[in-house]
Structures are given as structure tokens and as C-alpha cells.
Image (spheres, helix red, strand yellow):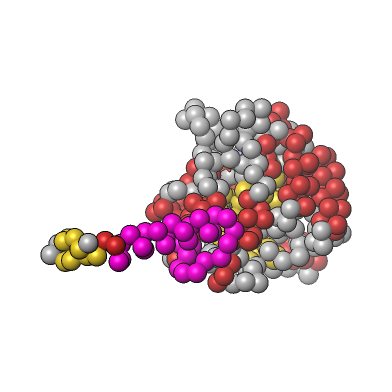
Amino acid sequence: MPIRLCGLRFRLDRFIIPSLIQGTERMNDWRSGGSYAGPIPFRLVSRDSRPDGSTLDINGIEIGGREVVVMAGPCAVESRDQLFATAGAVQACGARILRGGAFKPRTSPYSFRGLREEGLQLLAMAREEFGLPVVTEVMDTRQVEPVCEHADILQIGSRSMHNYPLLEEVGQCKKPVLMKRGMGATIEELLLAAEYVLNKGNDRVMFCERGIRTFETSTRNTLDLNAVPLLKRLSHLPVIVDPSHGTGHWWMVPAMSKAAVAVGADGLLVEVHCSPQEALSDGPQSLHPDRFAEMMQEIRAVARAVGREIPEVQPAITRPKDRAKTLNLSR
Ligand code: PEP
Ligand code: MN
């Protein structure tokens, strides 16, 4: 049955209908965990393109390898004292990367929305002082340049996963990207968000499952741990889990961290605050350093049980500044 479109004749029965059916079959095949016969919608992030998985090197720390990399710190950078106290505490427990928000997406415009550029500078100072790489959120294309200048990993927040101009902008820079799952996003949408970044030339991306919105109201979100084995099956990129936003309750964080390590997470993103009841954002889900220290021991045991590792804390390393003092180079 030929039809005419823009002066061209199409055979509905021979071409258009069969290709529509084929496309639907492919999507269904993917959803049921089958393999593709033809082109797939997330070509670059697909495990098919790197069957052995990819690892990211963050200043010598490997993400996606044998180690489960713990990233910890406050939800928001509030002051030098607050950031440095937390950074020192999490480092002493074995955290390898310091987290802290300078630009904070908040539901209310009247809430604390971060120290912005000053927050970035404090993060850079903490990075220098403790030798920990820094992960912080970038919310807007105009923030990409300053955040790249001060941070080691750019966090795309849950609310920004669908901000395609932002995804393309971070795709054009050289810094690794932590792609958080949108709170209402499917796994397919998350994969395609990462595809935007890779498609612009930046393949240093990791996913972060941080909980999705469901009908349940007793937790802030529902931490979808299905996402971990699913993403690892479909994509070669490492997968991080954020049990702080995933639950909203500090007392649930250790249990869900252990679960995340058990199901194969390559890392954790955990909120820690020295005085959670005084935190300017996300205090109820922030662990006190003492609880964080206990949790690190527990997840170390789980990591060992599943063939991964979280290295024991090394004796305090000599920082560049101290080395300068030893060599009598300081003024
Ligand atoms: C955060 O990490 O502090 C944050 C705002 O996370 P999310 O985008 O997952 O809500
Ligand atoms: Mn937070």
C-alpha cells in the first residue's frame, strides 16, 4: 500500500510498519535483559562497547577497580572550620574523596543555598591541606568553568540530570563526572544522560544511585539498589551509591551502605557532619564522624566478603606543607 509524502512514495506494509515493530521489539528485548540485534540507543555507555568495564583514575585513586571508594563530607560547605574538621575526620576513617556542596539546589529559595565561589575556594584549600580529591555539584553551564578550576569531580545533581545543555557542557571538559540519577528518572533515561556526556568527548563518567521518589513517605527516597547490578550489566561505567539522600535518615545509612557494597557498588557518597543538628542542610541524614568510623569498619568486612577492599587507614601521611617544613623550604 504506497503512500505519498513530500512527493515520495512509501510502502507502508514493506518498510514503515516492519521497522516500527522491529524498534519496539529491540526496546522490549533490552528491557527484559536480552541482547540487541541492531543499533542501541546508548551506544557509548553500553557495556557492549567495553565488555571489561571501565575504571576512572582520580589523582591515582581507581574507581571501578577492586577498591570500593568512599567519598564523604558535609552536604554543604558552611565554613572553613566546619569543612576542615569534617575532612580531617573522614580522612582518618579511610574516606578517599572529599564531598561538599558549594552551589546547593534547595527546594525553598529561602534555605541556605551554599557559599558559592567562596565554597569552591574552601574546597580547594581543604584539598591542598588534606590531599583529598574533591567532588562538588555544578548546577549551571556558567558554573562549569569555576567548578572545573577547583574540583576534581563534577557532580551532576538529581535535579540536573535532564539539563541537556549542562550535560553537553561537562561533556566538553576534561574533569570526571558523577552523574546522579534523577529522582523520577528511569534507568534508560540515566544511561542516556551519560550518553550526552560521552557523546561530547568526555568518557570519565560514573553513575550515582541516590534514591527515587515512590509512594513511600517514611523515607526521603527509596534507594533503588536494583540499579547497581542493572547499570553494571548494561553499561561499562562505574556505579556509586548515595545512601544519605537515598534514605534521609542517618541511622539507615550504615545498613544501606553495607547493602550497596554487597550488591556491587564501586563506591559510596556519604554525608558526614561534626554537628549534624546544626547543619545548614541535610542534618537529619548526616552521620556524626563517630558513627561514620563504625560504619567504615562494617563496610570493610562486607567488601572483603564480596572480593573487594576498602584499604585500612594508613598512618598520617606527610602533607606537602609538612614536607616543605622538614626540608626547611617554608618561610
Ligand atoms: C547532594 O549531594 O547534596 C545533593 C543535593 O544530591 P541530590 O542531587 O542527589 O539531591
Ligand atoms: Mn545533601
Residue 275 quadrant: top right
Q: Quadrant of ligand 1?
A: top right
Which residue sits at x=40%, y=59%? 21
x%, y% of residue 248?
A: 66, 34
Q: Is residue 34 magenta?
A: yes
Would you identify the image quadrant in which residue 150 lies? bottom right
Magenta span of residues: 14-42
Q: Is residue 9 left or right of residue 309?
A: left
Instruction: Identify the residue shown where x is 70% and y is 58%.
Output: 266
On the rendered image, what quadrant is the C terminus found in?
Answer: bottom right
Q: Quadrant of the N terminus?
A: bottom left
Q: Position of residue 72 (x, y in %)?
A: 70, 48
| Horizontal relation, residue 302 to residue 11: left or right | right
Is residue 16 toward the left or the right of residue 116 in the image?
left
Picture residue at 12% right of the left edge, 64% below the top: 7
Query: Toward the viewer: 288 or 120?
Result: 288
Asked whether, in this view, residue 156 is left or right of residue 233, the answer is left
Query: In the image as oriented, which residue stretches furthest toward the front?
Result: 1
Q: Position of residue 119 (x, y in %)?
A: 57, 45
